[in-house]
Image (cartoon, coloured by chain):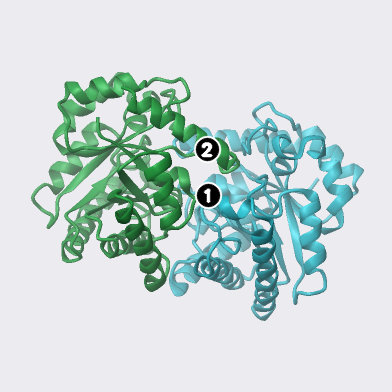
Chain colours: A cyan, B green
Amino acid sequence: MKLGLNLSFAIKRWLGGERLAALVANELETRYVQFTWDLVDPDWPASTRDTLAREYATAFAAAGVTVESTFGGLASYTFNHILAPTPELRALGKAHLRNAIDMTAAMEVPAAGMPLGSFSADDAVNPARREEIYKMALEAYVDLARHAREQGLSMLLVEPVPLATEFPASAEEALRLMTDLDGQTDVPVRLCVDWGHAMFKPLFGEKATMEHWMEVVGNYIATFHIQQHDGLYDRHWNFTRDGLITPQILSDFWDRHELDEQTYFLEIIYPFEEPDAVVLEDMKAAMKMLRSV
Amino acid sequence: MKLGLNLSFAIKRWLGGERLAALVANELETRYVQFTWDLVDPDWPASTRDTLAREYATAFAAAGVTVESTFGGLASYTFNHILAPTPELRALGKAHLRNAIDMTAAMEVPAAGMPLGSFSADDAVNPARREEIYKMALEAYVDLARHAREQGLSMLLVEPVPLATEFPASAEEALRLMTDLDGQTDVPVRLCVDWGHAMFKPLFGEKATMEHWMEVVGNYIATFHIQQHDGLYDRHWNFTRDGLITPQILSDFWDRHELDEQTYFLEIIYPFEEPDAVVLEDMKAAMKMLRSV
């Protein structure tokens, strides 16, 4: 299986391209990464942002590490973006992804992604409002995909999330989004499916299996997030902890579905108060476990 | 005891001033709030940001709810700010708090605050680098306090955090910061002490008590965050869960120290995937428990 790292584990800890690229290449021995916007905020002033982002990109390239995509992290996920209840908030959400596309282009990375957005509590339980806002989100993605192509990107990614108040949550919702956008956008919009989100039992019940996701939207899955979890919350634990997934399950899935180009990006979110030394040792141990299967 | 709400529980869920003010005033029956920057990002374009922030401020005032301060939340805490390893990142951190001061002024709220910032993993274990960056942070706060006064604010708040890689963490470090800034700034810089941070045993051991904090820096504590926790991680659980704190302990502490003006801001951070109805019921139950002592 093709193993990569989402860089969320490193935020606030190992900063700057040279330092982080050395850690990734030499200590964690990975050649594929997904760059998190928690390291460089797409909404920072463009000139400073692009200088900082390019410094990471250059250092990763020099270390022989490919940055396959850039992706929204914790700070980005704090806001509702293009599914927000007001035009002002939705416009800010659209500007946020547009900024991220520009930063990704500055890094010469081919793809950028994030969850689509969040409805407010009131809109989430109002089918007419959901539909109205969803339609505007489709239009926004057509515009954003045009901008992505102009900037030299070749794909946008959307991550389904395990919340009934967001969209897409289920495999069926993800299929609807893919079908609605397929052929309508200047670059393809594809899915980044997180194993912990897809297997979220409180929301999906018996359909909380990766086999179900492969059946329904397998053709649209461009990449994966992997994380350990208990099926009850979106834990983002590492595989050094027991839970519903094992490295063997990941490996068997990879072989059974004859995966090839997709990457398993390990996306671990540590408590901020976890000591740096604990995080690094835990990441090393997990990567060793994952490489052993 | 004077009970208030940090609005972190509401992010992505109950948006807009009218909706949130009604929920706070009528369903949670509180008259004091601390506005989180996760509802309106200080780094959004100023004109839109101030329009959105003023809408919250106006609605809270109309509902008879006082916004005592504005405060950094999850998105803000994702970055290193003025303790970051490079001049570019520190400048972005300084601009972030400056933007927050401007937004706070637009809301006609008298105080703004956040944790001071985070060292990188490498700087955190290098005493000379820590000292060098800390000295620059003091200068930044002198500048920011001048800007705060010019904008009509009367106080800046700093929140100690339970991480050896940040500053201040311990009561002793908080005292150093308070002493270094006392009398040097155009508006006072004071502490917002979080009970869950102050009682963090893995870092503070026997000194992980609120009594210790009151002895060392009691005179500088302008306000408190309250949360339930187990002393092992910074949980931000609600008081509907068992842990090291009870409403009675909070009440006894208030009486014993003859507190008066400080507010206990309940700061609960729910998993994003917790359903809205669960969050609202849990918040109501906790506020009822806290009001009953």
The percent position of residue B122, horizontal first and vertical second, equals 41, 45
Q: Does the residue at mark 1 contact the one at mark 2 (Cβ under 8 Å)?
A: yes
Neighbor class of circle 1 (other Cα within 10 Å; few <14, some 14-19, many 20+) is many
**Element under label 1?**
loop
Q: Which chain carries label 1?
A: B
Residue at 11 percent across and 47 percent down: it is B182
User: Looking at the image, is A277 positioned above or below residue B79?
Assistant: above
The part of the image, by quadrant, that contains residue A153 is: bottom right
Q: Distance between the residues labelled 1 and 2?
A: 10 Å
Looking at the rendered structure, the kind of residue marked 1 is Arg
Relative horizontal placement of residue B87, taking residue B44 as reference (left or right): left
Q: In the rendered view of the protein, which quadrant contains the N terminus of chain B?
A: top left
Q: Earlier in the sequence, mark 1 or mark 2?
A: 1
Looking at the rendered structure, the kind of residue marked 2 is Val
**Element under label 2?**
helix
Name the residue carrying label 2: B279
Label ID, residue B284: none
Residue at 56 percent across and 48 percent down: it is A8
Residue at 40 percent across and 65 percent down: it is B52
Q: Mark 2 lies on which chain?
A: B
Name the residue carrying label 1: B13
